[in-house]
Image (spheres, helix red, strand yellow):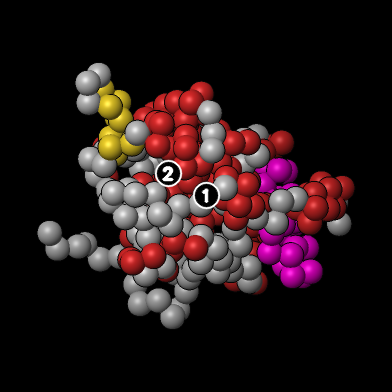
């Protein structure tokens, strides 16, 4: 095993266990909670009264303290529909409910406003915005949707987006074959192989995410590069049989290896084909790419 592989596997084992793994779609209590148990339109009943509890259950807080935990909690509640569109958000009420300062509430609402989830206007206050206004490419919103009631739609949309982005990125990357990048991609495949052999799904998923992110970054297209974070988020929240990356197996590993070989050979068409095969859903799922939807 290479030094890089050993280091990455060791770090992953000691890392925060709250990261998403395959099949962890139910980690947020609201995901399958009966409607009667969710937040009502006129009160905060059902919300976590203590942000410490939220931090222990929510991966999205990412160590950002009370501010990050409040963003996570309010964001989940908005995306899940517990706080519906045009619902007023009163800072004093939020501060009392979650026992945080005005500064924490104000900064949290600013973050949510930047994500398009809420709007603040003079004489109107802060209100929840409709889904059409949300920044659906924001990694946090991707995560919140993926683990909430909209998870099926989110997984389908992510699958469609990846099918559009990554084969093209693989083809373009074949024309930008820097030696250090080729080696890094090969290292990720090696790490995935060792992780799979040891049943280490966390290390496998992290190496997989780096592989796909790096591939997009070296495609030589800045607009595609901007989307690399979205693909990483998609890999972390897929949680089911959407693509060949979702479950560590020999076929998935082989396709990653084929991509690396095609890039090394400068064969863009082979790299694109291998990526499409990798993004093909598992046999138990009926369609490779969802058919056009009727409107």
Would you call the spot at circle 1 few (<14 residues within 10 Å), some (14-19), or many (20 or more)?
A: some
Front: mark 1 or 2: 1
Name the spot of residue 277 as percent of width and height, x first: 48, 64
Residue 103 on the magenta segment: no
Answer above or below: position of 53 versus 30: above
Q: Which residue is mark 2?
A: 75
Would you call the spot at circle 2 few (<14 residues within 10 Å), some (14-19), or many (20 or more)?
A: many
Look at the image and tell me in which quarter the C terminus lies. bottom left
Name the spot of residue 75 as percent of width and height, x first: 42, 44
| Residue closest to the eye, 258 or 241 | 241
Residue 122 makes an appearance in the image: yes
| Residue range highlighted in magenta | 182-203
Left or right of 197, for residue 74: left
| Residue closest to the eye, 163 or 154 | 154
Mark 1 vs 2, N-terminal side:
1
Q: Which residue is mark 1?
A: 49
Q: Which mark is residue 120?
A: none
What secondary structure is the stretch in magenta mostly built from?
helix
């Amino acid at each position: 095993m290479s030094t890089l592989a050993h280091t990455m596997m060791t770090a992953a084992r000691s890392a925060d266990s709250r990261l998403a793994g395959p099949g962890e779609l139910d980690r947020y209590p609201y995901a399958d909670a009966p409607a009667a148990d969710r937040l009502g339109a006129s009160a905060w009943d059902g919300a976590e009264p203590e942000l410490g509890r939220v931090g222990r259950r929510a991966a999205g807080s990412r160590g950002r303290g009370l501010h990050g935990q409040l963003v996570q909690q309010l964001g989940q509640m908005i995306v899940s529909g517990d706080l519906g569109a045009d619902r007023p958000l009163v800072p004093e009420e939020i501060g009392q409910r979650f026992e945080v300062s005005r500064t924490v509430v104000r900064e949290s609402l600013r973050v949510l406003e930047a994500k398009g989830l809420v709007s603040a206007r003079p004489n109107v206050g802060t209100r929840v915005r409709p889904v059409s206004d949300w920044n659906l490419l924001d990694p946090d919103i991707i995560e919140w949707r993926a683990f909430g009631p909209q998870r099926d739609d989110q997984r389908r949309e992510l699958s469609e987006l990846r099918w559009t982005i990554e084969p093209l990125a693989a083809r373009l990357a074949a024309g930008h074959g820097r030696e250090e990048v080729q080696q890094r991609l090969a290292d990720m495949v090696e790490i995935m192989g060792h992780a799979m052999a040891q049943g280490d799904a966390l290390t496998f998923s992290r190496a997989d995410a780096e592989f796909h992110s790096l591939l997009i970054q070296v495609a030589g297209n800045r607009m595609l590069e901007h989307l690399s974070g979205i693909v990483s988020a998609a890999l972390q929240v897929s949680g089911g049989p959407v693509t060949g990356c979702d479950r560590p197996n020999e076929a998935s590993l082989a396709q990653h290896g084929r991509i690396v070989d095609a890039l090394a050979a400068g064969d863009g068409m082979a790299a694109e084909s291998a990526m499409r095969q990798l993004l093909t859903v598992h046999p138990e799922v009926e369609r490779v790419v969802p058919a056009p939807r009727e409107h």
